[in-house]
Structures are given as C-alpha cells and as structure tokens.
Image: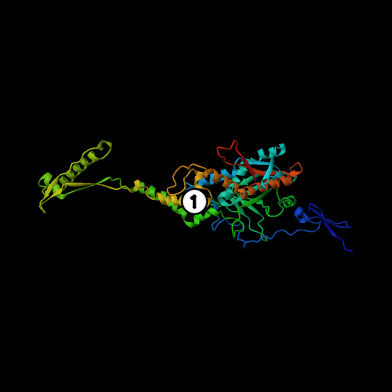
C-alpha cells in the first residue's frame, strides 16, 4: 500500500504516513483544506490578470500620474475638497470601536457589545487608529483605492501595528502569473521617481480575497505587508476608478473651473465706464464761437475741460442727487434745434450675475457624482442653489440614509482590523473580537435621547 501524504492542520508541514520524511510546506491554513479533511487542499479563487506592463511596476494612468492629476483637479475646485471631506467625516462618524455580536434584533440588526481590553487599547493608541480610519475612508472616496500596511512582530506571532499609506504614492509591482507580488511606495512619482530609485520602498502584498490570515501566517518574506482596499469598478484589474471621476471625463469639472477663471479675467479687464456722453458737433461752435478756427491743441484742452466738469458732477457719492442740465442748440446744417449733449448709462452685465446658473448646474453635477446631497452641505437644491439647507426633516433623513448606505466602504476599512483580531487571537466570551464604526443618527426633536448605530 502506498504511503498517504498528511498535511498538518496549520499547513506548515507535510509527511508520509508510516514514513520518516517530513517536509516544511509553508502553505498556511488555507492550503490545509479549511472545512475539509487534512490533506485535501481547497482551490483558491480564480485571479484573472490584465496583460502585464513593461517595466518593474504597473503605471497608474497613461503617464503614471493619474492620482496627482486628480489631486490638482480637486484643489482647483471650490466644491470638491469640502464635499469629499464632509463625505469622509459622515462615514467616520464617532470613530472605530471593537466588541462582539451578542445577538440580533427582530429587524436583523446586530446587538453589539462594545468592549475595552487593555491589550487592544494599547494597539489602538500605538497605531493611532483614528488616523488610520479617517485616512483610509478618505483615500477610498477620492481614488477608490487605499493601502493598509500591517506590521508583524519579530517572532511573527502577532500583528503589532497598522497604518495607511498615501494612495497617491503607491504603485503595484508588475504581476507574476496574474498576481502582483507587492507595492512600491515612492513620494516622488511626479518628480521623476522610479521603482528602483533610493526613495522607493517595496512592500509585499497580501491577497484580500482568500484566507489572508492563513497566507500571512505562512509568509516569511518580511515584517510589513500591504493589504489593499478598493471599491470595485468594471474592467479594472489593479487600480480601481472612483465613480465620481466621470466629472473629469464628462467635462463638467472643466465647466466649473472655467467660469471663475472667466469672471476673474472679466473683473480684471472690464472697462469701468459708467456713462457714455454724446456731444453734438454744433455745441462747440455754439459755446466757443469760431471753433473751426481754433488749433487742435486748443480744442483738445476745451474738450478735456468739459469732460472734467461732467465727471465732477456725476461721479462718486458727492454727485448723488445732483441735477444735470442739458440745452438745445440750433444745428446750422439742418436748421433744427438739437440737444447739445446726451448722457447714456452703460449697462453692467456683472450686476446681473453672469453665468450664475451655469455655475449652479456644474455644482449640481459635482454633488450628484459624489453622492452627497447639497442639503448636507448647507446648500438649498434647485435653481440658484442658495445658502441654507432649508427646514423640516430633509437634511436629517438624507444624513441617515447616507450613513445607512455606506456599509460597504466601512466594511473595507475594518476588514484588516478583523484580520488582526483573527491573527492575534483576540477573543471575548468565546468569540473573535470584531470591529465597527460608531455612526450616530440625527434624531428629531421629539426623541428623548440620540440613537446610534454600530456599523462595520
């Protein structure tokens, strides 16, 4: 009878039954057949891959500077920065917490018991977990990609820290057999940075789709690992595309940008002329006699004096409520009485709010693309989009709906934390510690106390 190969439950060793040969496998728990018999390896999910790029890394965008271009567009718009920050703040809510699920309510919602464990509290403080949570959500909102970095202890028995790397500085290494082995972190991509220069740091990558805990337990290629977070988008293999990026491709962001540029130029270059004064040619002969006999310089001097007199009468607050008198004179050519001069006020187009409606429409497209109701930003929707969110329950309902539909984003951010709980074997009352964001709901005045929802 042939010897049967047996693999240890943790997937680290294999040996022949009845034999004396032992092999170190480093497969991890996933390879040992989780949910099956030892030795029966489960297949990992299929990982399709795009055709690999040339070079050591996969560029983010055609010129590898897509994130930097996005940041420039955000910084040049008055609506995007504050709305993205507001969106992140609403998702973050009251911050991260941990505990166990003790049951479920009739509507299916969790009964969550928040805990305080000294070991985990030390981890929270040491990792500045509030910064991790906010920055991870922010990168997901801006780029649909975030890169969490996990740090394991020297003995590899525990994960000792977590941080979020700046998404704009991260680039995937060239895939091997359909899988990218790691991330290059370099803050100088927009300054000639390269994958192999002195400012670039390679960090191994964990696959978030299949038994990341078992895979990390089996790894020996470092003490820091990137756990990628992303909002899926169609036909994107590595770098995902935020849905709001349609603003940039559709041209509405360009419209929103061009209006203030045009109006700034208009304010700078417009003529500050308030009145157009038309003086009949017969006036000069009537007032000064032999007008045609005067020299050119004398005529220019007299015209300047007349203009000065008009300005003294009509300009500034001193000219308010003054009376301007006009006379009629005889035009010798037509032998008819004509007005000596006419005063016409020049229409100021800027006072009518030039392009206000176009600017409001562009802003409306921005709010829609970001998925944030204008009312949540203190702006009344509709024509003009003036300040003030209006009364009634609309902002409250919109806020509550936004929080309740943000679950997937928050699930992604807590995913690495749940991995840490499993890796470190953080348990309470026979259950693994799990993580949630504490999201307060806006209540009506009739409610006696605020309610909160613990969401992942």
Q: Nearer the viewer, residue 156 or 93?
A: 93
Q: Quadrant of residue 311?
A: top left
Left or right of 28? Residue 254 is left
Left or right of 152? Residue 381 is left
The picture places residue 244, in percent across and down from the top left corner, at 53, 53
State the residue at coordinates (64%, 61%): 49
Against 127, is 196 above or below?
below
Q: Secondary structure at mark 1?
A: helix
Left or right of 186? Residue 315 is left
Answer whether residue 317 is visible to the viewer in this image: yes
Answer whether residue 28 is visible to the viewer in this image: no
The quadrant of the image that shows the N terminus is bottom right
The picture places residue 349, in percent across and down from the top left corner, at 33, 48
Q: Nearer the viewer, residue 201 or 418?
A: 418
Q: Which color scheme does this rendered protein use?
A: rainbow
The picture places residue 386, in percent across and down from the top left corner, at 44, 45
The picture places residue 249, in percent across and down from the top left corner, at 50, 57
Q: Nearer the viewer, residue 384 or 137?
A: 384
State the residue at coordinates (72%, 53%): 211
- Residue matched to label 1: 366
Q: Residues within 10 Å of mark 1 (few under 14, many from 20)?
A: many
Number of marks drawn: 1
């Amino acid at each position: 009878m042939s010897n049967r190969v047996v693999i240890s439950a943790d997937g680290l060793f294999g040996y022949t039954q009845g034999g004396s040969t032992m092999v170190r496998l480093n497969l991890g728990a996933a390879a040992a057949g989780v949910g099956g018999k030892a030795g029966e390896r489960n297949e990992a999910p299929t990982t399709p891959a795009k055709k690999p790029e040339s070079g050591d890394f996969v560029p983010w965008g055609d010129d590898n500077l897509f994130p930097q271009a996005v940041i420039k567009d955000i910084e040049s718009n008055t609506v995007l920065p504050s709305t993205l920050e507001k969106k992140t703040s609403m998702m973050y809510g009251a911050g991260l917490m941990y505990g166990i699920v003790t049951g479920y309510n009739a509507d299916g919602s969790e009964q969550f018991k928040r805990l305080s464990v000294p070991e985990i509290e030390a981890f929270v403080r040491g990792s500045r977990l509030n910064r991790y949570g906010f920055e991870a959500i922010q990168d997901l909102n801006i780029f649909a990609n975030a890169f969490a970095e996990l740090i394991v202890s020297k003995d590899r028995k525990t994960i000792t820290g977590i941080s979020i790397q700046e998404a704009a500085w991260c680039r995937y290494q060239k895939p091997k057999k359909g899988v990218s082995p790691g991330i290059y972190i370099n803050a100088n991509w927009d300054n000639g940075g390269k994958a192999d220069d002195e400012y670039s740091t390679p960090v191994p990558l964990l696959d978030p789709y299949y038994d990341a805990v078992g895979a990390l337990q089996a790894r020996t290629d470092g003490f820091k690992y990137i756990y990628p977070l992303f909002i899926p988008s169609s036909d994107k293999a590595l770098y995902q595309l935020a849905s709001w990026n349609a603003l940039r491709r559709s041209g509405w962001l360009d419209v929103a940008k061009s209006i203030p540029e045009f109006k700034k130029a208009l304010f700078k270059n417009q003529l500050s002329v308030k009145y157009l004064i038309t003086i009949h040619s017969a006036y000069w002969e009537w007032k000064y006699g032999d007008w045609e006999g005067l020299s050119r310089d004398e005529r220019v001097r007299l015209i300047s004096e007349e203009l000065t007199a008009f300005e003294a009468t009509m300009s500034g607050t001193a000219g308010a409520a003054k009376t301007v008198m006009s006379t009629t004179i005889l035009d010798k050519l037509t032998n008819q009485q004509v007005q000596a001069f006419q005063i016409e006020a020049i229409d100021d187009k800027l006072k009518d709010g030039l392009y206000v409606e176009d600017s409001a429409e562009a802003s409306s497209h921005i709010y829609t693309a970001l998925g944030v109701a204008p009312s949540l930003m203190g702006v009344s929707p509709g024509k003009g989009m003036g300040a003030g969110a209006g009364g009634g329950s609309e902002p409250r309902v919109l806020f509550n709906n936004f929080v309740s539909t943000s679950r997937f984003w928050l699930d992604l951010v807590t995913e690495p934390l749940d991995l840490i709980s499993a890796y470190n074997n953080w348990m309470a009352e026979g259950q693994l510690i799990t993580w949630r964001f504490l999201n307060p709901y806006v209540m009506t005045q009739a409610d006696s106390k605020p309610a909160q929802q613990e969401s992942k």
